[in-house]
Image (cartoon, rainbow, N blue to C red):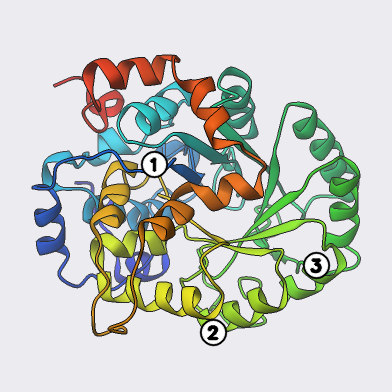
Amino acid sequence: MDEALMPSRRAVLGGFAAAPLVATGATVAAQTRQPSKPPSGFIIDAVAHAYNFDLNNYYNRASPIAGAYNYHLICNPPEHRLTVEQWAHDWQPEEFIDTMLLESTTDLVCMHSVILTDFTRDGLVTNAKGAYLKKHYPDRVIWYAGLDLSQSREQVIALANDVVAQGADGIKLYPRGLNQTTKKVTGWHMDDQKVAFPIIDHLRDLGVKHVAVHKLLEYDDEPLREKSYYGINDIAGAAKRYPDLTFHLVHAGWALVENTVLLMREYPNVTAVLEGPMLWAIIDPPRFDSFLYTLMTNVGVDRLMYSSAATGPHPRWVIEAFERHTPFSGTDPSFTLTQADRDAIMGGNFARLHGIDIPGRRIAIADDRFSRYRAEHGLRRPWTASRGPA
């Protein structure tokens, strides 16, 4: 492996995703012996990305890749890990959707575009990829388009008009960035009356009902604090002003869990999207139990939504880890995960919040190419497009 890509401690603990690496080898080795089984519910991945991990896409080729690739290694069984050369490429839409729907029991994908031009040339996940997937697979794809609020209001509004016209179902925002020209940090809060509110007003006028915000997980040098750009104190102002919109905390459960509980109890239009913490079912089950127990017992289960964080980890292993997960008695002997709880987290909540009729959607996808392939062949070998057929 290129030494420049070896994950540093900083990259592991504060990069793409971070968690204690306890008992990782034993956990991953054990999961390779588990057979794939179809879950009882309808699985909707609330956040997945067709990333551009090509090294030429980065201004600093090593910094973001190391942490992300480290999580690929620890969340995939040894026999299903990709080399850096296989993994660090520009995921194309067809490659992405085949990985999600042919290689796991996922039924529907919410594809999040990302605008992070502070360290990538194309923003990491282009809106063009999301528009393509929404156009070609409308029964299988929900698309959250990316906006960059550090741009001028006119630019943001023009892009908002464009992505909504192309079928965007929601909007994804990042609250902090770095201007590559001036090298100055750009940032804003969700309750900013000059930056955020005019854009949210416009989105609401366009008919957008869902706004997702990257929170609770820093990806640069700013420490996570309650009032930092990655904190969640600013969500209350937006949630109160726009009770008819739903605000999705992406990476909920990662940090500031008690603050998240207070926010969600006060505002029923705030949800917890579990991108990142779902991986703890693989690499740190006690930590997984801790945040899940806190949210479920203090808020409830009806606004918690599964995310695989693909295409870093493979969705198959995240799904299977959760399906077989049994809560630890050390959390609370009375704490259980019923099948109804699992089904709600894995897709039922997302479907309800987005007005998706699951029985009707099952009929709509029953004879598409993904359903036919899985019925005839079972699940395809993980990472086939990146590695080639066995």
Q: How far apart are marks 1 and 3 (CA)?
A: 30 Å
Q: Gap between marks 2 and 3, in whole Å?
A: 19 Å
- Give me the residue at 30% from left, 38% from top: 87
Point out the tag, 2 or 3, that comes first from the N-terminus.
3
Residue situated in front as seen by the camera: 306 or 161: 306
Image-based side of 126 in relation to 200, left or right: left
Q: Residue at x 37, y 67 (%)?
A: 18
Amino acid residing under circle 2: Glu
The residue under label 3 is: 238
Can residue 17 be seen at all in this image of the molecule? no
Residue 282 on image: x %, y %: 25, 60
Between circles 2 and 1, the one closer to the viewer is 2
Query: Can residue 39 be seen in this snapshot?
Result: yes
Judging by the rendered image, the residue that carries numbered circle 1 is: 311
* Callout in the foreground (1, 3): 3
Disc 3 marks which amino acid?
Ala
- Disc with the residue nearer the chain's start (2 vs 1): 2
> Residue 212's x, y, as percent?
65, 55
Q: Name the residue under label 2.
A: 258
* Amino acid type of the residue that numbered disc 1 sits on in the rendered structure: Thr
